[in-house]
Amino acid sequence: MDVLVDSSVWIDYFRGGAKAIKLDYLIDENLLVTNDLILAELLPFLKLKKQPGIISLLQKIRRLPLQIDWAEIIEFQVLCLKAGANGIGIPDLIIAQNVKDFGCWIYSHDKHFEFMAKVLRIKLY
């Protein structure tokens, strides 16, 4: 079972958040994956904070390639709008597509993913 860990979880983890135990488990069991979009959200901040060790560790996590299908992203947005959500951003839709393409789970603290799990039938960790 691969789990794509969203930037919201990593940020909470770096701040010593209460939900860090779940991420520790995924790290210990080597179950987590990432993608370039999530790294692009995390690495600039870590570079500014001069955290080369953390950057190096994040870059060693297995990456899922992003194969963006824009027609599917549009369809995802239409489904979400029909279901009543109009604030889901394109990056979150791309992450949802990545999760769906690879049949993995998403671990996020972002409420959008809870909504998308129901509408798009992605697996929420």
Image (cartoon, helix red, strand yellow):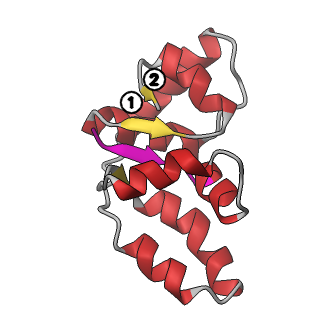
Percent of width and height locating residue 111: 68, 30
104 relative to 124, above or below: below
Neighbourhood count class around disc 1 (C-alpha, 10 Å): few under 14, some 14–19, many 20 upward: few
Q: CA distance from mark 2 to mark 1?
A: 5 Å
In which quarter of the view is residue 3 placed? top left
Residue type highlighted by circle 2: Glu
Question: Is residue 84 rendered magenta in the image?
Answer: no
Residue 34 visible in the displayed image: no
- The disc placed on residue 72 is 1
Query: Residue at horizontal 49%, vertical 55%?
Result: 24
Q: Is residue 113 left or right of residue 125?
A: right
Residue type highlighted by circle 1: Glu
- The disc placed on residue 29 is none
Q: Is residue 37 left or right of residue 51?
A: left
Residue segment shown in magenta:
1-7
Residue 3 visible in the displayed image: yes
50 relative to 124, above or below: below
19 relative to 48, above or below: above
Percent of width and height locating residue 10: 59, 57
Circle 2 SS class: helix
Query: Residue at horizontal 34%, vertical 32%?
Result: 100
- Of 62 and 100, nearer the camera is 62
Q: Are marks 2 and 1 in contact (CB under 8 Å)?
A: yes
Circle 1 SS class: helix
Mark 2, residue position: 75
